[in-house]
Image (tube, rainbow, N blue to C red):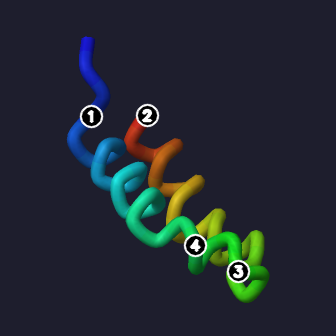
């Protein structure tokens, strides 16, 4: 079984912008809203 296409997109977006997320200006709430919540919704 392969990963859902939407999950792959989230991972790819994070990977492309990793430096900005690790810069210290990106907070936990932003991370949760943009990545964690959508990822769990995709996985059900």
Label 1–label 3 contact, CB within 8 A: no
**Label 1 sits on residue:** 4
Could you tell me if the residues under marks 4 and 1 are in contact, i.e. CB atoms within 8 Å?
no
User: For the residues marked 2 and 3, what is the alpha-carbon distance in whole angstroms?
Assistant: 28 Å
Quarter containing the N terminus: top left
Q: Could you tell me if the residues under marks 1 and 2 are in contact, i.e. CB atoms within 8 Å?
A: yes
Q: Position of residue 6 (x, y in %)?
A: 27, 48
Q: What residue is shown with label 4?
A: 19
Q: Nearer the viewer, residue 37 or 13?
A: 13
Q: CA distance from mark 3 to mark 4?
A: 6 Å
- Disc 1 crowd rating (10 Å Cα; few below 14, some 14-19, many 20+) is few
Residue 39 is left or right of residue 31, and the answer is left
**For the residue labelled by badge 1, is the local secondary structure a helix, a strand or a loop?**
loop
> Residue 5: x percent and y percent?
21, 41
Q: Residues within 10 Å of mark 4 (few under 14, many from 20)?
A: few
Whether residues under marks 4 and 2 lie with C-beta atoms below 8 angstroms apart, the answer is no
Q: Which numbered mark, 4 or 1, is in the foreground of this view?
A: 4
Q: Which mark is residue 43?
A: 2
Mark 2: secondary structure = helix
* Front of the two marks 1 and 3: 3
Query: CB under 8 Å between callouts 3 and 4?
Result: yes
Does residue 35 lie above or below 40 as drawn?
below
């Amino acid at each position: 079984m392969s990963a859902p296409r939407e999950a792959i997109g989230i991972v790819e977006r994070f990977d492309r912008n990793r430096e900005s997320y690790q810069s210290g200006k990106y907070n936990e709430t932003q991370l949760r809203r943009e990545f964690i919540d959508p990822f769990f919704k995709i996985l059900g």
